[in-house]
Image: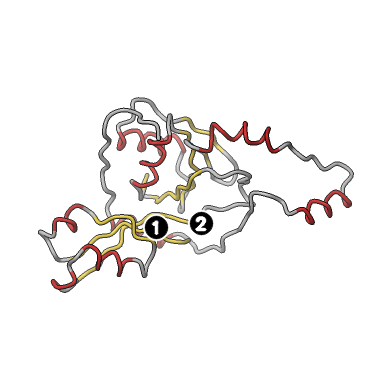
Amino acid sequence: MEHCGKNLYPESSSPSMVMQALHRRASRRPHWTTHRIPDRELEAMQRRFDDVVEVDDDVLEEVRKPWKTSAVLIRSLGRVVPAEWVVKELRRVMELPEPPEIFPLLEGFFVVRFSCEEHREKALSWGPWLVAGQIHAMERWRPNFSPGAGELNKAIVWLRMLGLPLDYWEESIILQMAAKAGKPLAVDEITEQGKKRGFARVKIEVDL
């Protein structure tokens, strides 16, 4: 992984604000897409339509290179927030030397491309991203993604575990319990230190 400069330190979003924003989002059924049309389906399309374009895999691979390692797909889970605001927040929190590139798409989606893979991965791991009171889903850019046909299916949120007994205050146990709600990513600093034990706070990835 390419190194892109100085150490970056995130600022945590308020867990209550994040959960409120997530709950305000209407539930929707995810749309599933694949990166390649099955051969049978392609043959059926070729029989039905006169002109079906087949793009050479080598050409596609070359075109995808600038996006595969440094780009993310983003969409607000609530009301639409200008992409510029989101990028401004990314740059502020991550202390990036220059703003990432923005590529607006349809249906409220946009792509953000960072200067390197390291910044992309940090942005993904530092969620949840709460901008203008709206939580934003963020995933690695994927080939063949088309707004309207594809959907972002995951979000990062903070999970609060209230009233945890003292004998359960062990990071491995906390992560094991958090796994029932989603994919555990990390505990916050206060939980890790164990100095305040009113509640444990765990960052998790949840399916939408």
Q: Secondary structure at mark 1?
A: strand
Which residue: 43% across, 29% down? 115
Q: Quadrant of the N terminus?
A: top left
21, 193: nearer the viewer = 193
In the image, which disc is placed on residue 205? 1
Q: Residue at x 49, y 33 (%)?
A: 102
Q: Position of residue 27 (x, y in %)?
A: 50, 64
Considering every residue shown, the one lying at the far top of the view is 98
Lower sequence index among marks 2 and 1: 2
**Amino acid at circle 2:** Asn
Q: How dense is the environment of label 1, judged by Cα within 10 Å: few (below 14), some, or many (20 and up)? A: many
Residue type beneath disc 1? Glu
Residue 153's disc is: 2
Between 106 and 6, the one nearer to me in the picture: 6
Residue under the point 54% across and 62% down: 28
Neighbourhood count class around disc 2 (C-alpha, 10 Å): few under 14, some 14–19, many 20 upward: some
Where residue 199 appears, as percent x and y from the top left, is 19, 65
Q: In the figure, is residue 197 to the left or right of 178? A: left
The structure residue drawn at horizontal position 17% and vertical position 67%, both measured from the top left corner, is 169
Looking at this rendering, what residue extends furthest in the left direction?
195
